[in-house]
Image (tube, helix red, strand yellow):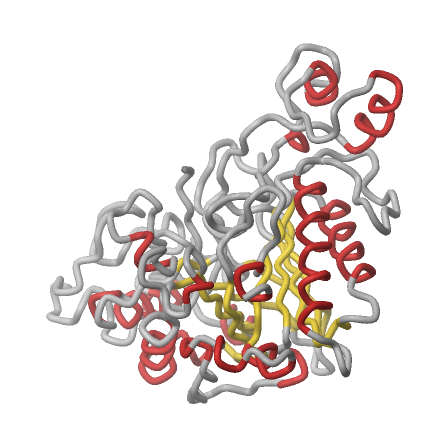
Amino acid sequence: MRRVRHGGPGDDTGSGGPGQQARPAGGVTRRGLLGAAGAAGLAVGTVGGAVGRAVADGGSGGAPALGAAAVPFHGVHQAGITQGQQARVHLAGFDLAAGVRRGQVAALLRRWSDSAARLAAGRPAADHENQVALDAGPCSLTVTFGFGASLFDRIGLESARPAALDPLPDFPGDALDRSRGGGDLWVQICADDALVAFHALRVLQQQAAGVAGVRWQMSGFSRSPGATARPITTRNLMGQLDGTNNPHPADASFASKVFVPAQGADPAWMAGGSYVVFRRIRMLLDNWENLPVDRQERVIGRRKSDGAPLSGGSETSPADLDKENPDGTLAIPADAHIRVAAPAANSGATLLRRGFSYHDGFLPDGAPDAGLLFIAFQADPLTGFVPVQRKLAGADSLSRFLRHEASGLYAVPGGAAAGGYVGQALLES
């Protein structure tokens, strides 16, 4: 499994964004399949066959095209959690239409899962195929589904609602627009191509007609693959290297921190699942950019140029929180972000962050409406996000430059097996 390096509140590098990771090769394009399936009898869903190889390398025998990278939809866990960061994201919350029953939601999740699996393999959608992404390959597309707390009351499954979906507490400084958060259903769509990501969002929105409508939708971006000479930690809109201290999938405690255990899961239908916290966090960039670089570094606790902690070393050097400057002051200030957010300062609380930057134009005063679409996965938000955010809101000097404007908490079921669909264990219980 590839290393994931992301950021966000609770990270020790700032407010979101991952390091860029290499993509696996393989996969076929929608156009290649549409053109070849009828003529040659190509089995739809085949990856790596003669047609797939010809399309991936342009028929020239060279390196595979970036768009050929594919992430399987089916698996123990949903895609879009541990995978390397893609360049684009669409997030959306859906509310059920009045009178919708559990069976209709199950049918919708089956349609959505089928379409997500097809699109992730570079195949055309079965329904509402608008050909927007006809010429593209999979482009590392992932589609991730979640359930909001309100869903369970709407379809008569109150007893199956996880205790971990209890509402998040109010945090100091929150300025939340409730209409841009929450929702019965949550969707995360990520891809390395903007058209592929939009196409998937449009397909899912059309397939939900009559069952669920869009409550809110937001779009974000990260560094494009190949934008740097080598894979490195990306920078957020504050210019900070962001994501140095994200947990590593190879860590012994990674699975227990991020996923609900398969044995003894409560409720049982969440086995292999996770919980995601979403926050739209606007960065007060005009205020931030007026600070001299050395002051920015003291707010974060890291050098801006290379991400090294102010205690010395390189980006990946452990921060020495006890080190003092020659004048006796702490090398890493007491209110520096990396000190306040450190797991050691939060009873070991750990989040897997997968944040994206956003820019939605300019506010009436000319300030950029820009910042972070914070996305964090964890096994239990009550021991993950909640204690960390409480600490950050009260003691982190970075909080003066951030505004939390939207929020959501969702149960992300485990992955679907081939032939099944996400949420099947709940919706058919």
Query: Which residue is at the front of the view, 379 or 192?
Result: 379
Front residue of 4/429: it is: 429
Residue at x 29%, y 67% (from the top left corner): 349
In the depicted structure, whether residue 277 falls above or below residue 175 = above
Q: Viewed as shown, does residue 10 lie left or right of 46?
A: left
- Residue 259: horizontal and vertical position, in percent? 38, 58
Q: Is residue 153 visible?
A: yes
Q: Quadrant of residue 97?
A: bottom right
Image quadrant where residue 292 sits? bottom left
Q: Nearer the viewer, residue 317 or 204?
A: 204
Total marks shown come to 0
- Do we see residue 373 in this rendering? no
- The front one of 2 and 157 is 157
Image spot of residue 53 (x, y percent): 68, 17
Left/right placement of residue 276 relative to residue 337 reads right
Which quadrant holds residue 325?
Answer: bottom left
Residue furthest to the top in view is 61
Tell me the residue at 65%/46% (across/down).
191
Q: Is residue 224 above or below residue 413?
A: above
Q: Is residue 111 above or below residue 20?
A: below
List x then y, in percent, for residue 311: 20, 57
Question: Which percent across, then down, holds residue 321?
Answer: 17, 64
The C terminus appears in which quarter of the rendering? Answer: bottom right
The reply, left or right, for residue 262 in relation to residue 188 is: left
For the point 65% across and 63% down, which residue is it? 91
Q: Quadrant of the N terminus?
A: top left
What residue is rendered at 52% in x and 68% in y?
289
